[in-house]
Amino acid sequence: MAGTALRGRLTWQAAKVLAVSAETATVRTVTLDVPDWPGHQAGQHVDIRLTDEDGYVAERSYSIASAPGEPVALTVERLDDGEVSPYLTDELRAGDELELRGPIGGYFVWEPEDGGPLLLLAGGSGIVPLRSILRHRERTGSTVPVRLLYSSRTLDDVIYRGELDNPAAGVEIFHTLTRHQPPGWPGYARRVDATLLAEVAWPAGLMPLAYVCGPTSFVEAVSQTLVQSGYPPQRVKTERFGGTGGT
Amino acid sequence: MSPVSRGFHRRRQDPAENAGRVPPGQYVTRDFPVLSAGPTPHTPLGGWSFSVGRPGRQKTWSWAEFRALPSEDVTVDIHCVTKWTKLDTAWHGVSVDTLLDLAGHDGPFAMAHCDGGYTTNLPVEDLTGGKAWVAYAYDGQPLEPEHGGPARLLVPHLYFWKSAKWVRSLELMDTDDPGFWENYGYHIYGDPWREQRYAGD
């Protein structure tokens, strides 16, 4: 399998916070000015490093929410028992600095020449790298057909709701709300299962390219079902947020 | 020296007994997170085999033969490049020393090949001397597929992407060719104590 060109050493650099905006009650998007940013691909992530007054250092990885060519933006969900995420969502404000290095990861990425049709499957904050892919598709003028299935607990937990309510031409968006649905909710109302995927996913015969991102239970169930319905495993790319549990 | 992050305060206090066990940039988790680039393969044990050696002259074991090899309990700390460290994980499996003694020490480097196409490269000296295992049980239970079952490599002194899930062979080589994540910019060796996360670290 072909790797992306290896870059030089990934050095830590100071990034300045341009803005912090609310996506939901517990999710914020942090937009950064990174002076020497080498550019990124849709789907990649960064490491950030925080240092307290005693010299204690904490590092975490976050997916990039913005498209290549846009300022680096990270969308962070606050985990109440976490150490880093509550700082980023509740304390950080415009003008602050943090250390960052990246971009990291070259497999869970999409470029227009990778084609499609694209099937994007998000559980919770797993939407973040897929939103970068959606914006990249729109900004590059790609006409690759896209279906996005996004599983959230409630309507209030849907990240990028305004943006997703106005999809670009050729993008179909399906929501499922697993815990609570508003009266008259027209979307799905259960965890993603084989029947739901059969209704939403592109038929395997179209040779779709699938990107699955979310908690481990979501990714395991969804990717397994796709393979059982005929998707070749190498056309199903996964990114799991279990790895940042408790941060 | 890194600049102080305004308003950031430490929230995690590792107990004293963890001192010296958590590499730089890591935090301790009690969960067992799962990370992999694609769907979890489900290989039936009847079709499973494990091979060690050069292409064309490998020693190969069936599942039954592999399970009959001498095996041992191993309790180790593991460190994932995504920053989590898990202490005192309990495994059971076959030492890679045992496998190489039977197959022949036939080269200085190894590439682990896995179901699903994943690969990772390691120096053979990091697989020998009681430092590496092919593990098929975790916490006294058969290793679950999402954690790499039926068997995964266990090389706890390197970042955990080197402990390849669903491992099926160790190919011996003359050169240290990069594997899957190593081709995507991750470090060729991956020592957590030297924080070798990415190429050039």
Image (cartoon, helix red, strand yellow):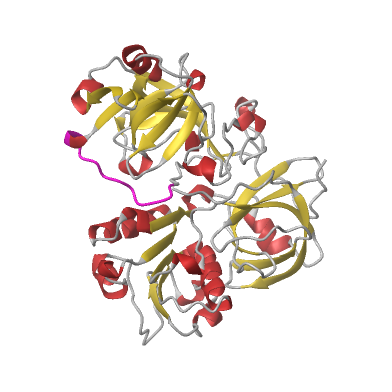
The picture quadrant where one finds residue A237 is bottom left
What number of labels is visible? 0
Q: Residue at x 54, y 49 (%)?
A: A246
- By secondary structure, the bulk of the magenta-drawn segment is best described as loop
Q: Position of residue A245 (x, y in %)?
A: 51, 50
A197 with respect to A48 (left or right)? left
Whether residue B39 appears in magenta in the rendering, the answer is: yes
Q: Position of residue B128 (x, y in %)?
A: 46, 16
A21 with respect to A186 (left or right)? right
Q: Residue at x 37, y 69 (%)?
A: A178
Q: Is residue B66 visible?
A: yes
Looking at the image, the residue that sits furthest to the bottom is: A184
Whether residue A52 appears in magenta in the rendering, the answer is: no
Q: Is residue B91 visible?
A: no
Residue A199 vertical position relative to residue B88 in the rendered view, above or below: below
Q: Residue at x 49, y 39 (%)?
A: B30
The picture quadrant where one finds residue A68 is bottom right
Give the extent of the magenta segment: B36-46
A195 with respect to A17 (left or right)? left
Residue B158 vertical position relative to residue A119 in the rendered view, above or below: above
Looking at the image, the residue that sits furthest to the left is: B46
Q: Position of residue A165 (x, y in %)?
A: 49, 84
Residue A113 vertical position relative to residue B136 in the rendered view, above or below: below
The picture quadrant where one finds residue A24 is bottom right
> Which is nearer the eye, A179 or A102?
A102
